[in-house]
Image: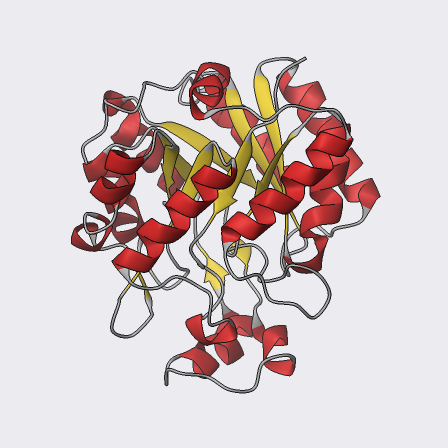
Amino acid sequence: MNKVIISAAVTGAIHTPSMSPHLPVTPDEIATAALEAAQAGAAIVHLHARDPETGKPTQAVDVFRRFLPTIQAASDVVVNLTTGGAPTMTVQERLQPALRLQPEVASLNMGSMNFGLYEMLGRFKAFKHDWERPYLANSDDMVFKNTFRDIAHILESCSAHGTRFEIECYDTSHLYTAAHFRDRGLLPGPLFIQTVFGLRGGIGAHPDDLAHMKRTADRLFGDAYVWSVLGAGRHQMPLATMAAAMGGNVRVGLEDSLWDGPGRLARNSAVQVQRIRQVLDALSLEVATPDEARQMLGLKGRHNVAF
């Protein structure tokens, strides 16, 4: 039986900083959050960056360079950098950290999609920065753009330095898109398929949705993929539990959910890693180490990066 890979998305991408005082924003906070998650048992940490002054998402490589060496020096955790950034960025902006820093893993959304965050305005009233409320309010007219050309450009740009991709699939069509790029020779196996549930604009978070995505992935990829599940908000732990029981891997972290139970904010992503570890223990499942995750995903190794 394969061990379970725990990924921890420790920096908020879709959430604004004011929604939780525990979201890491500065480089030091991001490094600390990543190392805490790794110590708790995450084999992979998925990282975005923030402008430390304004809290806005940024893909500036120099900001990533302010926390990546700290993580690299203190842990053998697998680093996974975003190519998603924010819907307001161009594909060239979003690509820069993965292209120039050459991580072992980078995330890659398999398509353009509506990205509705406006419902959060009904749950959060106070905001720290002037940009936050308009950003959420305008998300009912927001599209995250990743065309076939964009995806091909990212895959081709990063192929020379051996970065593999966390293929983020927010709906069934994204699985078919991943198969399309596999057939074009741009996505060699084993594919790391991260199925995402419960975000407005993507597939829902019903157990039938999860089962449907798993059946489709099995049919398209056979045994040439590694399956993981990300549930947004309150769906994080229930769907991760289902995925683990079905033989899958799991992703938790403050990017995907701010909570550590009903009405209780998680103080960091490590708390969520610890909680899912309790579930895995109860299911008699073992947690993969970073090196075991590298073997399962066919990664190039932690010393073959540019940070």
Asked whether residue 285 appears in the rendered view, the answer is yes
Vertically, is 162 above or below 254? above
**Colour basis:** secondary structure
Whole-percent x and y of residue 178?
A: 53, 30
Q: Quadrant for the C terminus, please.
A: top left
**Residue at (25% x, 32% y) in the render:** 102
How many marks can you see?
0
* Left or right relative to 94: residue 230: right
Vertically, is 93 above or below 26? above
Whole-percent x and y of residue 122?
A: 65, 81
Residue 273 occupies which quadrant of the picture? top right
Residue 193 occupies which quadrant of the picture? top right
Q: Quadrant for the N terminus, please.
A: top right
Q: Nearer the viewer, residue 95 or 252?
A: 252
* Left or right relative to 118: residue 132: left
**Residue at (71% x, 24% y) in the render:** 247
* Left or right relative to 211: residue 51: left
Whole-percent x and y of residue 125?
A: 56, 86
Whole-percent x and y of residue 167?
A: 50, 34
**Residue at (63% x, 54% y) in the render:** 232
Asked whether residue 109 appears in the rendered view, the answer is no
Residue 175 occupies which quadrant of the picture? top right
Q: Nearer the viewer, residue 70 or 170?
A: 70
Vertically, is 140 above or below 82? below
Q: Nearer the viewer, residue 252 or 165?
A: 252
